[in-house]
Amino acid sequence: MQKVYPDTRAALAGLLKDGMTIMAGGFGLCGVPEQLILAIRDSGVKNLTVVSNNCGIDGVGLGLLLDTRQIKKMISSYVGENKTFAQQYLAGELEIEFNPQGTLAERIRAGGAGIPAFFTRTGAGTQIANGKDEREFDGNRYIMERGLVADLSIVHAWMGDTEGNLVYRKTARNFNPMMATAGKVTVAEVEHLVQPADINPDHIVTPGVYVKRMVHVPNAVKHIEQRTVRKRTAAPAGTGEEV
Amino acid sequence: MQKVYPDTRAALAGLLKDGMTIMAGGFGLCGVPEQLILAIRDSGVKNLTVVSNNCGIDGVGLGLLLDTRQIKKMISSYVGENKTFAQQYLAGELEIEFNPQGTLAERIRAGGAGIPAFFTRTGAGTQIANGKDEREFDGNRYIMERGLVADLSIVHAWMGDTEGNLVYRKTARNFNPMMATAGKVTVAEVEHLVQPADINPDHIVTPGVYVKRMVHVPNAVKHIEQRTVRKRTAAPAGTGEEV
Amino acid sequence: MAWTREQMAERAAKELRDGFYVNLGIGIPTLVSNYIPQGMSVQLQSENGMLGFGPFPYEGEEDPDLINAGKQTVTEIPTTSYFSSADSFAMIRGGHIDLSILGAMQVAENGDLANWMIPGKMVKGMGGAMDLVAGVKKVVVVMEHSAKSEPKLLKRCTLPLTGAGVVDMVITDLGVFTIDKKRGGGMSLVELAPGATLEEIRSKTQASYYVGNALAAA
Amino acid sequence: MAWTREQMAERAAKELRDGFYVNLGIGIPTLVSNYIPQGMSVQLQSENGMLGFGPFPYEGEEDPDLINAGKQTVTEIPTTSYFSSADSFAMIRGGHIDLSILGAMQVAENGDLANWMIPGKMVKGMGGAMDLVAGVKKVVVVMEHSAKSEPKLLKRCTLPLTGAGVVDMVITDLGVFTIDKKRGGGMSLVELAPGATLEEIRSKTQASYYVGNALAAA
């Protein structure tokens, strides 16, 4: 059972089809499977429905697929300051379905966990509730949200072993673990590829069962959307300075 | 904000009340908060509803609270070979609500996650569905199950820092992480008590927000329910012997 | 000269494929792990929260923190991962486990399965069985063909169900049946144990079933 | 001589308690972290999947894998833990975060909140705001009292809602209001910024509100 593919193109071979639904991990530009997105761009596949919390920025992350007009519809919680996105949306060339971020995360988790629907208080009494079942439990109003699955999930992990066991680094974890469970096929790019037993089994976040194919991306370029820093003062980091 | 208490009795002080609902982590005798159960026994609190996958064995784990007749009702998936349990149940002194194991786990996870109800295929078409809402999604039948919360959750962890961040060891993780999220108050016993930053933040399974009180149990006694072993052969563990 | 327990397990092992993730129940299903072909990657799932486990530990190396769903001490292998029971059943319910092999008290011709309680007897609970049969992609039952001359392959289960329309295949000491649970195509006898005859099976089976072409011709 | 942005943040910081877990929105709410009293343990949650974070990194120490919900580079502290976004919102939705401080376009006297879209303008999305106001135990809004002389404290929000009946407290540059969202007890003015008068607030507020005893007597 060979899960490791030589490059991103090989890892996606046979999986891409016009009109398909793809889940892409990441939050902002953090933990985004950028190398797999590049390969999807190069494949030319189109009319995609993409499930991702954000849509990258101009020319970076999923922004790459906007430039080439490969995306028909986004299911997201926040699309930010992307100019290409705004243009295509205002021109009616791009559909968008906004989900509250936590509802989006939970819908994906539910999809992967065989839960077709669940109730949440998030969005009750707002336009997000339009057309959804509402129900009262213990005196509070909740709306029903559906589980979400995709034809393909692409995720970015810090480290993976050849069995497909994955670990993530810091806030680059974000949507990747749930999406890994909710794709009919999940392809992972990993910064560090190791052998089974090289990851402590108590530390594994995504068990190998969820990962059908993987590719090693040792030179992944990482972007920062909002570079915020503080000046070094004479004294080194003291508690007084900590927020 | 001091979360660490000197002993199990102090850690439970003021939290116990007759008729309350307690979630207790563990599967079989593995990962059971045995020291906290002992303190609950010694407190004499009674008429308890206990949510736990199993009910220990005679004289061990939750079996301790059966001997003293402190439990009124169990919410479990499997109660096994416990004689005291069988006696009290057949005498009508003990109620039991059986839940499929995965439904129980998910109900607890939902309770902690603010999800009042969800749909599952598990149990559809069986007597477990009696009295529950049924609904069809995409051609399949599902039943609605409710989220579950408790007045108190007691969990057992391998290691915890003083902020309440917890990690578990091997299959002793089981129900502990979800239960930690679903108690109005959660008390954790930890085999190893360390300082913040001593646990890699990528490895933390239960973030400190869920743990209100903790107690160090350095000499926790661990039990084995089914000791199964293989004989050492002349050759050391070769692949041929592996099941 | 019907199949022994070991031979039933060996027959069940033929349902394994390279790369499969498999959950094995207690009893005969546990024995299936002895028949995984060399070189085939099969990862065993234990529903308490473990994927990829090895044989029983050597004497003295038992770890109370390392048990399978039968509460037996087991061992870690290089591919092992641990997770919570909620994550474990998300894996099961979500259809990520390829094959579940488990025992049964009764199986009906429509794929209904009963294996968790007998009314009037002390009920121990269903554990993870209901989740497994509802969630796993393929469900194979391994059981004796009849219990004390009572048939176990029935038109309708008389015991409370573990799952409705969930069984894909039944392996008994006398033969192998498939059930077309999805399209309601009924049950078919597709294989005979050595020495078993169509007549013997007919006499010990209450369920209606087709006889596969190869067998009918034989 | 109303409150400055910093003073509004300082006032909001008075709602912090030792041991609190807090989520701060973008803008003025972010400044609240500068006013956490020494010795008070307050852990900041970032909804992308982090609990316990520190200030911006020193120049050259930015880590692309370490950002807050505003996509800004931040730092780790000894208490930090990381988790998935699903786990993060389970924490929020499940009521485990004590306090959410966030900005708003409009707040109504019944606790309704609007802060995510203006019809006719390009909508960027609600991000985690709807989850936060629906799930966090106490929701404090910090905002300018009015926008270009348009009141923002209204009888009914005119913009699409982020949450219905969710706000507990509003801190503006002119004063502090509480809202009894649970029992429908309406809105009350409980504190005046230095130099602000009851008349000024009355003239700039469309919402009905009680005037707290201490203020009415003054």
Image (tube, coloured by chain):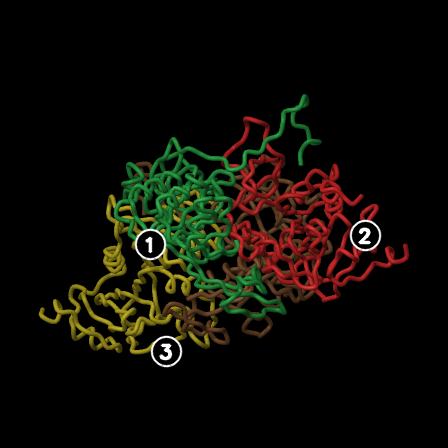
Chain colours: A green, B brown, C yellow, D red
Residue picked out by circle 3: C158
Q: Secondary structure at mark 1?
A: loop
- Say which mark, if any, is on residue B173: none
Q: Are marks 3 and 2 in contact (CB under 8 Å)?
A: no
Vertical relation: D138 (above or below) A64: below
Q: Are marks 1 and 2 in contact (CB under 8 Å)?
A: no
The CA distance from mark 1 to mark 2 is 56 Å
The CA distance from mark 1 to mark 3 is 45 Å
In depth, the one of C36 and C123 nearer the eye is C36
Q: Nearer the viewer, mark 1 or mark 3?
A: 1
Quick check: D158 left or right of C71? right
Quick check: C103 left or right of A137? left
Q: Quadrant of residue A34?
A: top left
In depth, the one of A190 and A201 nearer the eye is A190
**Are discs 1 and 3 both within one chain?**
no
Report the amino acid beneath label 2: Glu
Instruction: Locate the N terminus of chain C and report the quarter of the image it occupies.
Output: bottom left
Vertical relation: D123 (above or below) B83: above
Chain letter of mark 2 equals D
Query: Which residue is depicted at the point 59% across and 56% down?
Result: D94
Q: Are marks 1 and 3 in contact (CB under 8 Å)?
A: no
Q: Quadrant of residue B242?
A: top left
Report the amino acid beneath label 3: Thr
Residue picked out by circle 1: A20
The CA distance from mark 3 to mark 2 is 71 Å
In depth, the one of B119 and B190 nearer the eye is B119
* Label 3: how many Cα within 10 Å (few below 14, some 14–19, many 20+): few
Residue picked out by circle 2: D191
